[in-house]
């Protein structure tokens, strides 16, 4: 995210918009996860759940000044500011990693259906896809928090006034470069998925309608990836008003909510159609698919 001096340059309206978007996104993502776990008819890949969790964490971190009562305080409490300053850089990398993991899982599922036996077990592969997005963010969080704790004068409310950060630009640039790299890989993987879906229209799903819905969702998800790449590049170059960059960075989680939160099975669960007379007594934990290699991407994403 864009950092800067201690001067609050953003208007109250922009700050409120930024925090409102992130608060709406993390609470809606939380509702989505609860719905998936409670409704026996909804099935999602483990990497989808992981991506959802990463958006919850990221949006909560960006809106952290609101629940702590420090949002419009020109000099937030140091402990609150320290945590947010360290976390805002780490969650960028986390979201980028979980987006790449979801794309890779969908791609590998398709490839296994074509090639036969995989080179590693399903559990091993999915464990790697779930764990690896957290490695670099955890290192970033610990390193930045340690540095900021020893250099308290470098922990400030950024010039946008939307969240806390550091006066030194190095952590932000490292995080932005790493995230941009992952997002480029994600965009490439999603492009391959789109190409495969287009060439195998009837294999991807059992009907034309489902195939069309799948391809549209993949295309929209790819667009989210492209937006992420552009915004991270803007962070590297940093030529624009940080408030505008921050608002742009609020769009991907909002898009995620509308793309994946408005799927028919989730909407039907809330209308009660999936809650009654269901013969599937599988526990909620087993519904998080880690080994399903179906080409019906509707159940994957």
Image (spheres, rainbow, N blue to C red):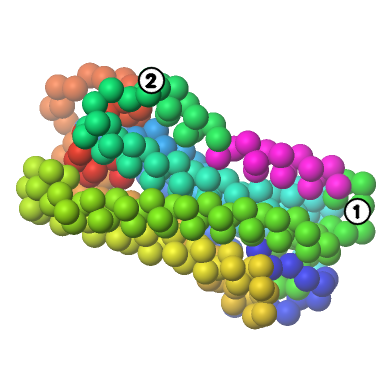
**The magenta stretch spans which residues?**
133-147
In reply to whether residue 142 is colored magenta, the answer given is yes
Quarter-wise, where is residue 188 in the image? bottom left
Judge whether residue 246 can be spotted in this image. Answer: no
Disc nearer the start of the sequence (1/2): 2
Give the structural element (helix, strand or loop) at label 1. helix
> Residue 53 — which label?
none
Per the model, the C-alpha gap separating discs 1 and 2 is 47 Å
Q: Position of residue 90 (x, y in %)?
A: 66, 48
Q: Is residue 110 left or right of residue 250?
A: left
Which residue is farthest left? 207
Location of the N terminus by quadrant is bottom right
Q: Is residue 168 above or below residue 159?
A: above
Do the CB atoms of the residues marked 1 and 2 lie less than 8 Å apart? no
Of 54 and 221, the residue lying toward us: 221
* Residue occupying the point 47% across, 26% down: 127
Q: Is residue 42 left or right of residue 176?
A: left
Location of the C terminus by quadrant is top left
* Residue occupying the point 78% across, 71% down: 4
Q: Which residue bears the numbered disc 2? A: 121
* Residue occupying the point 88% across, 59% down: 154
Quarter-wise, where is residue 49 in the image? top left
Q: Which residue bears the numbered disc 1? A: 152
């Amino acid at each position: 995210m864009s950092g800067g001096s201690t001067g609050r340059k953003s208007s109250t309206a922009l700050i409120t918009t930024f925090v409102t978007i992130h608060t709406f996104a993390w609470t809606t993502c939380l509702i989505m996860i609860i719905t998936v776990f409670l409704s026996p008819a909804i099935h999602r890949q483990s990497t989808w759940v992981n991506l959802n969790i990463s958006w919850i964490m990221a949006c909560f971190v960006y809106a952290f000044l609101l629940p702590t009562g420090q949002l419009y305080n020109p000099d937030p409490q140091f402990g609150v500011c320290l945590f947010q300053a360290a976390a805002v850089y780490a969650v960028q990398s986390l979201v980028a990693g979980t987006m790449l993991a979801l794309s890779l899982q969908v791609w590998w599922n398709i490839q296994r259906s074509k090639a036969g036996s995989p080179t590693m077990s399903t559990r091993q592969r999915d464990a790697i896809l779930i764990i690896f997005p957290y490695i670099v963010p955890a290192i970033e969080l610990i390193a930045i928090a340690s540095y900021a704790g020893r250099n308290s004068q470098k922990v400030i409310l950024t010039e946008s006034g939307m969240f806390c950060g550091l006066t030194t630009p190095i952590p932000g640039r490292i995080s932005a470069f790493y995230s941009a790299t992952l997002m480029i890989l994600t965009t490439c993987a999603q492009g391959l998925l789109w190409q495969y879906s287009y060439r195998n229209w009837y294999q991807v799903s059992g009907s034309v309608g489902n195939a069309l819905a799948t391809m549209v969702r993949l295309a929209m998800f790819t667009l989210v990836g492209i937006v992420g790449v552009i915004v991270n590049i803007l962070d590297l170059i940093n030529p624009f008003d940080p408030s505008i960059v921050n608002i742009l960075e609020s769009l991907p989680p909002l898009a995620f909510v509308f793309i994946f939160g408005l799927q028919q099975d989730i909407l039907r669960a809330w209308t009660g159609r999936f809650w009654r007379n269901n013969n599937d007594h599988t526990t909620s934990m087993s519904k998080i698919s880690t080994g399903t290699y179906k080409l019906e991407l509707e159940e994957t994403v």
